[in-house]
Image (cartoon, rainbow, N blue to C red):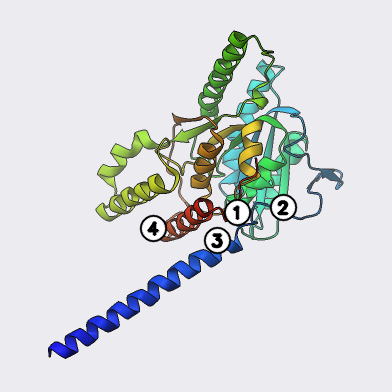
Amino acid sequence: MGVAIWTILELLLISAIFLAFGLVATIVFETFRRRFNHTHVEAPPVFEDPSSLKPVLCPHIFDPAEKYISLVIPAYNEEHRLPGALDETLNYLERRAANDKTFTYEVIIVDDGSADGTKRVAFEFVKRYSVDNVRVILLGKNHGKGEAIRKPFASAKALLKQGMLHSRGELLLMLDADGATRVDDLEKLENQIHAVAKKGQQLEDSSGRDSTIRISDVPATAFGSRAHLEEKALATRKWYRNFLMKGFHIVVLLAAGSGIRDTQCGFKMFTRSAARKLFLNIRLKRWCFDVELVYLCKWFRVPMIEISVNWTEIPGSKVNLLSIPNMLWEMAIMSFGYRTGIWKICS
């Protein structure tokens, strides 16, 4: 009997060792595989003008700003939710532009290879507001949120990355296509970034140096946050959801450090200078795209401000409990990549 128990324990130990070795080997492989994810060799990106059917060359994040603010919206199969969000967003932007002639804007919609009518819906708004104010970038397949924001960002998150790299604003705002956050809350983030810039300008004045600083030249970020809603959420969510979310927050703290309580809110603002540093380096394209942004902000010492925003649960969310293992996996790869130096950060 005793021999049988020891045999079983030995088999379990050997199995655990093999599993651990396999996990580490997979993390190392994935880290090396993604080490050049932040670089892209591609044809010059263009926007399609649906009125003239002529391609319009995309600007680049290194070009001087031409607009005051760019709003980047990643969209994947958002035919039904996108119209409401765009109506609210563009009505707000048009009101501000009418009241302030110095206020200029652009909305960049990154279509992540949608299979429904998202492209058609997006182009309807381009026709209504002109390609100078509303632009659509089409990507071939679903990569994740990060890529879309970067190229004017390639899959929800991949899409964000694409949008940021080819936007024209002094300030760049990423927001989700579901309209869960009120668009006028961008003023809260905007005011905080201006406060950071003003503080920097006062320091320049006191040092006797040239204080002619544009907001686009000051590295700063403002993160929309739903952390103030957490107490109510804890009371209404299932116990296991609370357990998983608390565990996720602890892992985020270990991977990216403290400072931002709600990393996953899809409402974030960057100055052009900050976006240039962050989105040229970001590698993750899906769930931990936001966590990597926090890590890179800390590495570059870019000021981060967390601001409470109004947020409403919108039916049709694509995030579920099965997303948490994917998030943990990406955080393990990110931590290993940066801490070992496999992932190089370009200054």
Residue for badge 1? 76
What's the amino acid at mark 1?
Answer: Tyr
Q: Tell me the tag on residue 27.
A: none
Instruction: Find disc 2 in the rendering and name its residue.
Output: 138
Gap in angstroms between the C-alphas marked 3 and 1: 27 Å
Residue linked to disc 3: 31
Q: Residues within 10 Å of mark 2 (few under 14, many from 20)?
A: many
- Image check: 256 left or right of 343? left
Gap between marks 4 and 2, in whole Å?
29 Å
**Mark 3 is on which residue type?**
Thr
Q: Write the residue at 17% across / 85% down.
A: 5
Question: N-terminal of the two: label 2 or label 3?
Answer: 3
The disc label shown at residue 321, or none: 4
Among numbered discs 3 and 4, the one appearing first in the sequence: 3
User: At x 50% / y 37%, what residue is drawn?
Assistant: 298
Q: CA distance from mark 3 to mark 4?
A: 24 Å
Task: Report the mark closest to the observer, 2 or 3.
Answer: 3
From the viewer's perspective, is the residue at label 3 or at label 4 nearer? 3
Instruction: Give the image location of residue 118, x and y in percent.
Output: 65, 52
Q: SS for tag 2?
A: strand
Asked if residue 43 lies left or right of residue 207, the reply is: right
Where residue 338 appears, as percent x and y from the top left, is 53, 51
Q: Nearer the viewer, residue 203 or 117?
A: 203
- Amino acid under label 4? Leu
Which residue is drawn at the image coordinates 52% and 65% (left, top)? 28
* Label whose residue precedes the other's in the sequence (1 or 4): 1
